[in-house]
Amino acid sequence: MLETELPKILIVDDKSENLVVLEKLLSSLKVQVFKANSGNEALSLMLEHEFVLVLLDVQMPNMSGYEVLEVMSWDEKTRYIPVIFVTANYADEQHKLKGYQYGAVDYLYKPINDVILLSKVRVFLDLYEQRIKFKQLNQRYQLIINAAGEGIFGADLDGKISFINPAAEKNLGYDAGKLIGQPISTLIEQQPQATELEIQESWSIQDIFKVCSEHKIFHKDDTVFKKNDNTLLPIEFTAAPIYDQHEQYNGIVFVFSDITLRKTVEEQLTNLALYDHLTKLPNRLLFEKTMSQALARARRNNKLMALMFLDLDHFKDINDRLGHDIGDLLLKGVSDRLVTCIRETDTVARLGGDEFAIILDEISATEDAAMIAEKIIHALTPPFYLNGNEVFVSTSIGIAVYPISGETSIALTKNADIAMYQAKQTGRDQYCFFTDIMNEQIRFRLEMVHSLRYSIDRNELELYYQPKFDLKTNKITGTEALLRWNHPVLGLLKPGDFIQVAEETGLIQKIGTWVIEEACRTNKHWQDIGLQACSVAVNLSSFQVVQDDIIDVIQSALEQSGLEPKYLEIELTETSLIVNTEKSAKVLHNLHEIGVGITIDDFGIGYSSLYYLKKLPVDTLKIDQGFVRDITTDSSDAAIVKAVIALAHNLELAVIAEGVEQQEQLQFLRDNSCDQIQGFLLSNPLPAREMEDFFRNYKTKN
């Protein structure tokens, strides 16, 4: 048995000897036996104790067994206690039927057969044990339901709530027991479906009952229940059929979980996945989804739509000069202004870095896109005030219009990017619509990049050398290495035809390294064959100056070639020095310590900061040919050249003028004490072998 207390059996007889006999017969069973000499005593005991079985004498004075059974039927506590009549009389069929009518479950006749008695009693003891098990199981289930963190409630086939646990009542905001008997529609509110997906995923109470009636489980992982205060509770729920003791379907049990936290986390994850963390604008992933939807609408409604690509002009310079914190503040400020320039139906997205995209949904004409572009340019004109810094920024905008500039998201994206590149090429701070001519230009550029990538491996690159001359002695003082590309289709190309492409694609590092190595190797070769020992000058772009391993590249080229550092000069423009002032200064000081010469190229057309001349280890200033060209006819150019020469000499720097093409220019420079010159007057740039011949054949002239 499951309980510590033994099951109780009541024997009732007005004769004590009969009670003794019955008690003795039951002594082999693990039971508690209670005895009563009358019907009244028996009824009193039944109210005090829970009996498994009553063995009741039929014929007793004052109250017969029939009368005891009748009184038992009046009380809920005693009505269902099984009773076996025990009698020596009334063995006829009529009295047996009367006993059954009063509620007896069986008849035993005196004298009692102990085997029959014990077998019948054991049946009721087994039933009692099963009832106890069932009761304990129900109690256990009730404890589990009440202790469960999930909300649990049941509904009958009429859709009325039949039971509910405390967690469900708490989550739904109801007092205990208030929902019992209420229709489940109290909790389930059907929401209007706005999209095709929502319509497909919609459900109803009837759907739940239909699924459960088919002995299946109904599950929704993301829906809502209506709370007592009419607010909506995000939940996940499962509905399963309930069966009675005959395995007949008679209701539904709902188990639900509050998923408010999950929804919050999902929303946060969605924001992380679809929105830029800095500007809070849609990111590239959400942009692509929105773009597909906008295209579908435009196609369905036979409308125009436009895609704009924007990036900020010279944003990298701002980042390098003021720091990334200011750069981030600028991006946020630009984002805020962009949002004010568009309609509610349009989308601004940040694609990364300083690149933005704007989707103009269903425009009437291409002029609409132009108006918004002008509005954006105007909005970005006023300065941004960022942590005490006044920052100006402009933007270049490329526009592609559906279906004129493309009919797919890929085509529009590519063409808007091409148009933006064209806007940058033609002056920045402007917008440009995509045209077929641009497409041809970008295709040519891509082919150029592809060819340039393999130019070194195919031995297509070559260095030309232009000699420099001392104006006092007329001797060659050195050469400048000038890059040429022997393109297999386009022929001989000068740096202006391909260096910008090399810089934009990152190929400049590989090409620049080759130039330094080749110039050092060639100059050492000239010295080894007995030609005049003089320096070779190599130009470094702004990208190379800040290259992390540029010092290692130069040292390696010197070591591999065996060229002494004093025979190598590095030429840099003023503009390249301000890209990263601190890094540039460190590079120049390191080169100076090695013994490499430093020349500021194109002096006078850049920032011409005297600070650089004072703080940096510069050896030579090179006057730009733009000033040299008109020195004999333009007094301003003449004055500038004289001033640069005087400045250089006062700072104990050498000065060289490039682009000398006329004898009058040479004479002016000589008269004003310029140290060196180079230009077509004395020699064109020459291939290495021709430069060897030039060295051998050159004779000093007065």
Image (tube, helix red, strand yellow):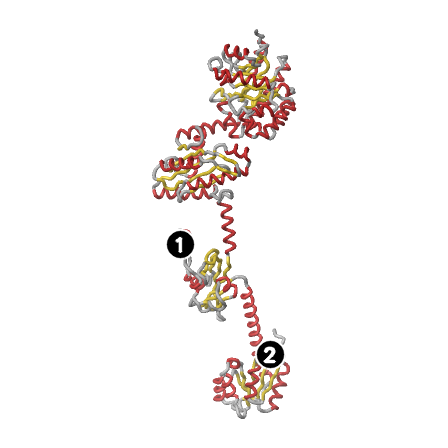
The answer to whether residue 176 is above or below residue 387 is: below
| Residue for badge 1 | 193
Viewer-proximal residue among 180 and 461? 180
| Number of the front mark, 2 or 1 | 1
282 to 662, vertically: above or below: below
**Position in image of residue 505 (x %, y %):** 52, 30
Q: Residue at x 51, y 42 (%)?
A: 278
Residue at the disc numbered 2: 7
Earlier-in-chain disc, 2 versus 1: 2
Classify 226 as above or below 304: below
Residue 324 in the image: state x and y as whole percent: 55, 37
Q: Which residue is at 58% across, 81% downward?
A: 49
Residue under the image location 50 percent in, 88 percent down: 67
SS class, disc 1 = loop
Q: Quadrant of the C terminus?
A: top right
- Asked if the residue at tag 1 contacts the one at tag 2, i.e. Cβ–Cβ closer than 8 Å, the answer is no
Q: Please give left or right for residue 293 compared with residue 77 in the image.
A: left
Q: Mark 1: which amino acid?
A: Gln
x%, y% of residue 607? 52, 25
Marks 2 and 1, how far apart at CA: 61 Å
Q: Quick check: can you spot residue 522?
A: no
Residue 700 visible? The answer is: yes
* Mark 2 surroundings: few (<14), some (14-19) or many (≥20) residues within 10 A: some
Circle 2: residue type: Pro
